[in-house]
Amino acid sequence: MSLNIENATVIYPGTDGRPPTEALQRINLTMDDGDFVVTIGASGCGKSTLLNLIAGFLAPTEGRILLDGTAVEGPGADRSVVFQKHALLPWLNVRDNIEFGLMLQGHAKAERNKVADHFIALLGLSGFENSPVYALSGGMQQRVGIARALTCDPKLLLMDEPLGALDALTREKAQELILHLWHDTGKSVFFITHSVEEALFMGTRLVVMSPRPGRITHQFDLPFSRQFLEGISARTVKASPDFIQIREEVLAIIFADEEAV
Amino acid sequence: MKDKHDKHLNATPPAKPGLIARLAKERPTKPGEIYGVPGSGDTMMLSLATIAVLLFIWWLITTMGWIKPLFVPSPQSIVAKFISVWQEGFTGSPLWLHILISAGRVFGAFLLACVIGIPLGLAMGMSPLIRGIFDPPIEFYRPIPPLAYLPLMIIWFGIGEASKVLLIFLSVFAPVALGARSGVRSAAIEQIHAAYSFGATRWQVLRHVILPAAMPEILTAMRIGIGFGWTTLVAAEMVAATRGIGYMVLSASQFLQTAVVIMGIIVIAGIAYLFDLLMRLVERKVVPWKGKM
């Protein structure tokens, strides 16, 4: 898998006499196989717009998005999206939600069951297969969403603030779960978050964006997720001097953007 | 410490707050309740009491002879009339046949309105082309009372079954179609995007996301629609009918048989209420997730 975003610019036309907004300005970004790219930035910096470009929900005004050398021209099963909320189907139970993508792609029931069983076990949802999704906690609902995204074996997993609606403790557990999944499946992940700590802990690369116009201002290579996967506990990683130093640096950048409004 | 505890136990419970304070909800809630929920509380007992009081007043004013039976017959005489019409029939047809014929007209029109209205409403929600074409005629006729276009139905379709069913159909069709149309908007954009990112076709998104998400609103629209159907029944049976509950009510009124009029009204209300209960049951079975996500 290789993703190349070349000079992507998105301009939303102005409505009611207001001038057009430049949501993204000449974005250049490359992702390679197994990368975990986390995007962070002040609100309005265009990180969700960038994810929508990669997902194919939005076409760039200028520039292009290449996935394995082919231009992205709409959503497709090679890129699965995990949303912050509202994306599960409440009329289906947990198993049918997880099988939803496979069902749409016309896989036979037996095969769907087999794949779903694997991910139900992998995400710790055993025993809840037949529960209605609205009866689950927010953390479990998100695990259903992640399982559903993984069933179709996407090249790239797009996660749009997937943990934003979870409480702090559930969130830390979910971060560790996602890192283990990333490590075990070898998927490439594009991940959006509002939390600097989450961004630093999860990513192999951090992309910091600034608003008005939305653009990439800083990029950092990060060692912390690998430290965690090598066996250092999450809290130890997050409390290390290196981690705290870069955390404050990134926070300073984002605060400066927020104050510039 | 022990003294204080005992004192607390021995203290008389605080006086119950007065009715005004309870209505105004100016008091903290008990454990298990949520403070400040508007209109919380069970109304079953109060509703039953209201019915009992209304029946009692009805019984009192008729039994005391304050109002002539011509204007308001007594409750007993309504029951007696129901039994006699059930046994002997009205204008040559038994009561069950009147009920059956009216129900046939209403449910026939209702089914037809659902079969045509729900797909059309969904199509209007999905396609600006279809919405642009069908919006003006539906919005034009929707607010017109059926009695106003009843003469047109007769001129165009005669005085047979067709004009009766069509009149009821039109009154059910608009709310059902508009309900299905706005139901299209019920699916969250994340649900739609998730389906598309699995490579779903437009048809699959409609079938597997938009239609199920719209079900609560479609079922509500069907409930509202059948209500309009019963409302229009009497108007429809003004047209040269010889059978039907609406016909029975109209015909009895011409002979000042007030008891039959009231009995017919209660029968219509009873059937409509039973069907509404059935629809609510269907709602609980079909969309148990309604409002939960």
Image (tube, coloured by chain):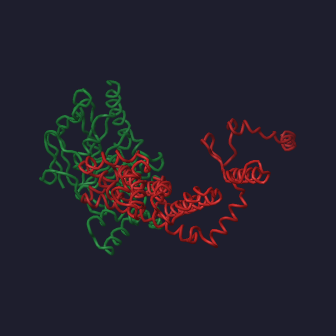
Chain colours: A green, B red
Residue A164 shows up from this direction? yes
Nearer the observer, B156 or B133? B156
* Rendered image quadrant of residue B7: top right
Q: Quadrant of the N terminus of chain B?
A: top right
Nearer the observer, B183 or A120? B183
Farthest-out residue, left: A69
How many numbered marks does the figure carry?
A: 0
* Rendered image quadrant of residue A100: bottom left
Residue A175 shows up from this direction? no
Farthest-out residue, front: B255
Nearer the observer, B225 or A96? B225
Is residue B119 shown above or below A38? below
Farthest-out residue, top: A260
x, y percent for residue B106: 46, 62
x, y percent for residue A244: 38, 37
Q: Residue at x 20, y 37 (%)?
A: A10
Q: Residue at x 43, y 47 (%)?
A: B145
x, y percent for residue B86: 62, 70
x, y percent for residue B279: 50, 61
Q: Residue at x 79, y 41 (%)?
A: B16
Nearer the observer, A94 or B94? B94
